[in-house]
Amino acid sequence: MTHWSEPYVGLPWAETGDAPDGVSCWGLCVLVYREVLGIALPTYAGLCACPAERRQIAAAIGGEASGALWVPVPITAAREFDVAVFRVGELDAHVGLVCAQDRMLHITQGHDSAVLDMRAARWASRFAGLYRHAEMMDRTGG
């Protein structure tokens, strides 16, 4: 039996993508939640018009994280499908999806999606928070 993350490794980058032919970091989360969990996440596609709007995008995602849809959890309690948020410059603007202990499925511009160690220096130093979708609280017991 294969792990749920395997079909999502190797997907190509696309600025606002959320389909197997191309994904952004958030689009990868949207795709996995839709196909694996049956949960529809907001796409924010209209907010990704240009790189100059990254501050507004980060604020919108931050607003979602502080709402009822996402529950902050400590990194020590990470579970599959939790969303890890990372700083890019001064903004919390990159996400990865926990797929195993200390491992995340993610994608960055110019690279295919991959599973990487969240403890690696590049990511650990930029870690900003971990969030669990409210529906996953019910499915996993919190």
Image (spheres, rainbow, N blue to C red):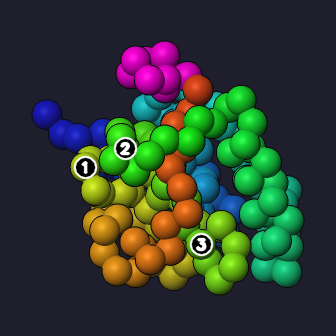
Whole-number angstrom distance, CA of label 1 to CA of label 2? 7 Å
Q: Quick one: label 2, few (<14), some, or many (20+) residues within 10 Å?
A: many
Residue at 49% x, 23% y: name it. Answer: 137
Image coords of residue 64 (percent x, y) = 74, 44
**Residue 46 in which image quadrant:** bottom right
Q: Which residue is mark 2?
A: 78
Q: Which residue is mark 3?
A: 87
The answer to whether residue 87 shows anywhere in this view is yes
> 61 left or right of 104?
right
Q: Quick one: label 1, few (<14), some, or many (20+) residues within 10 Å?
A: some
The magenta region covers 135-142
**Please, what secondary structure does the residue beneath circle 3 have?**
strand
Q: Quadrant of the C terminus?
A: top left
CB under 8 Å between callouts 3 and 2?
no
**Please, what secondary structure does the residue beneath circle 1 have?**
loop
Sequence order check: which comes first, mark 1 or mark 2?
2
CB under 8 Å between callouts 1 and 3?
no
Residue at 30% x, 39% y: name it. Answer: 4
Q: Can you say whether 108 is above or below 24 in the image?
A: below
**Residue 27 in which image quadrant:** bottom right
Whole-number angstrom distance, CA of label 1 to CA of label 3? 21 Å
**Three-letter amino acid code at disc 2?**
Ala
Residue at 85% x, 81% y: name it. Answer: 52
**Please, what secondary structure does the residue beneath circle 2 have?**
loop
Sequence order check: which comes first, mark 1 or mark 3?
3
CB under 8 Å between callouts 1 and 2?
yes
Image coords of residue 23 (percent x, y) = 56, 60
Image coords of residue 42 (percent x, y) = 72, 41
Q: Quadrant of the N terminus?
A: top left
**Three-letter amino acid code at disc 1?**
Gln
Sequence order check: which comes first, mark 3 or mark 2?
2
Question: Which disc, if any, is residue 101?
Answer: 1
